[in-house]
């Protein structure tokens, strides 16, 4: 996909705020601070379209970006951030769940996990949920620039073992710093669109 245009449309705090114009959607999910917004910027070749931050919990709404006037990228609120109130966390969870359920425009999800860590409970729960809802998804293991090749291979093997029962279409190594994995992610997105 050649990026002709990419613009922020709306940060929706509930589904009623989602854009009225319906287009195919690709959503990006993952833990708070895992690198969702950085991945979106990286694959669009834009530095600051999606707001990134070293403070977790930055993305608190469904952020819709319209790409090439043809489809949306949807940056979902990060889950698993301990330092917000239980009430707020429940709210985000409901928002993410209601977004994922019964959404015929949602073509696929890119589930972003941190390549440095052991498979995590909340990430596995998300994979299980996506599989249950029959939403095609890929896993992108990000921040591989922080690991040796040896550790990358080791962790990818662990991810395959933990996630394969929930049928991700692929597990792609990624770094927003080196841009490794960008082409592979686009190949998947193109096939979903
Ligand atoms: N080394 C390295 N750092 C990264 C990478 N991707 C993101 N980061 C850093 O991780 C931090 C969080 O990145 P964001 O893209 O804001 O993460 P997010 O998932 O959108 O965070 P929330 O919106 O708060 O949930 C920032 O300091 C980024 O610079 C990567 O591939 N490699
Ligand atoms: Mg973000």
Image: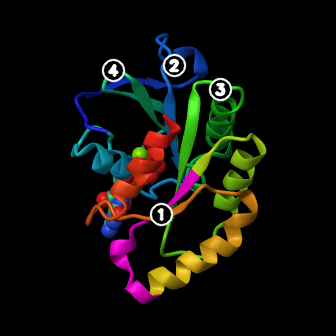
Of the image marks 1 and 2, the number of the one nearer the N terminus: 2
Secondary structure under badge 4? loop
Look at the picture and state if 52 lies above or below 114.
above
Residue 103: image tag = 3
Query: What whole-number distance in Å separates the C-alpha atoms at marks 2 and 3?
Result: 12 Å
Give the magenta range.
Answer: 138-150
Residue 55 visible here: no
Gap in Å between the C-alphas at discs 3 and 1? 25 Å
Between discs 4 and 1, the one toward the N terminus: 4
Q: Compared to 68, does 155 lie above or below?
A: below
Left or right: 30 as drawn, with respect to 86: left
Residue 142 placement (x, y as % from top left): 43, 64
Furthest residue toward front: 191
Q: Which residue is mark 4?
A: 69
Tell me the tag on residue 172. 1
Q: Residues within 10 Å of mark 2 (few under 14, many from 20)?
A: some
Q: Is residue 147 in the magenta section? A: yes
State the residue at coordinates (26%, 64%). Answer: 177
Residue named by callout 2 = 18
Q: Position of residue 119 (x, y in %)?
A: 63, 71
71 inside magenta stretch: no
Picture quadrant where residue 59 is located: top left
Would you say residue 144 is visible in this rendering?
Answer: yes
Q: Are marks 1 and 2 in contact (CB under 8 Å)?
A: no
Q: CA distance from mark 4 to mark 1?
A: 27 Å
Tell me if mark 4 has few (under 14), some (14-19) or many (20+) residues whose alpha carbon lies within 10 angstroms of its own. few
């Amino acid at each position: 996909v050649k990026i002709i245009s990419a613009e922020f449309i709306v940060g929706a705090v509930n589904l009623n705020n989602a854009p009225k114009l319906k287009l195919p959607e690709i959503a990006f999910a993952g833990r708070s601070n895992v690198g969702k917004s950085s991945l979106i910027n990286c694959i669009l070749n834009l530095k600051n379209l999606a707001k990134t931050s070293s403070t977790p919990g930055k993305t608190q709404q469904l952020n819709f970006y319209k790409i090439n006037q043809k489809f949306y990228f949807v940056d979902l609120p990060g889950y698993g951030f301990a330092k917000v109130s239980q009430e707020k966390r429940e709210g985000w969870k409901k928002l993410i769940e209601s977004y994922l359920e019964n959404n015929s425009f949602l073509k696929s999800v890119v589930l972003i996990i941190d390549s440095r860590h052991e498979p995590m409970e909340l990430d596995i729960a998300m994979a299980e949920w996506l599989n249950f809802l029959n939403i095609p998804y890929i896993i992108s293991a990000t921040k591989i620039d922080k690991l040796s090749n040896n550790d990358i291979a080791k962790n990818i093997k662990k991810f395959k073992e933990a996630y394969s029962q929930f049928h991700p279409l692929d597990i792609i190594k990624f770094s927003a710093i080196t841009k490794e994995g960008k082409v592979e992610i686009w190949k998947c997105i193109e096939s979903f669109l």
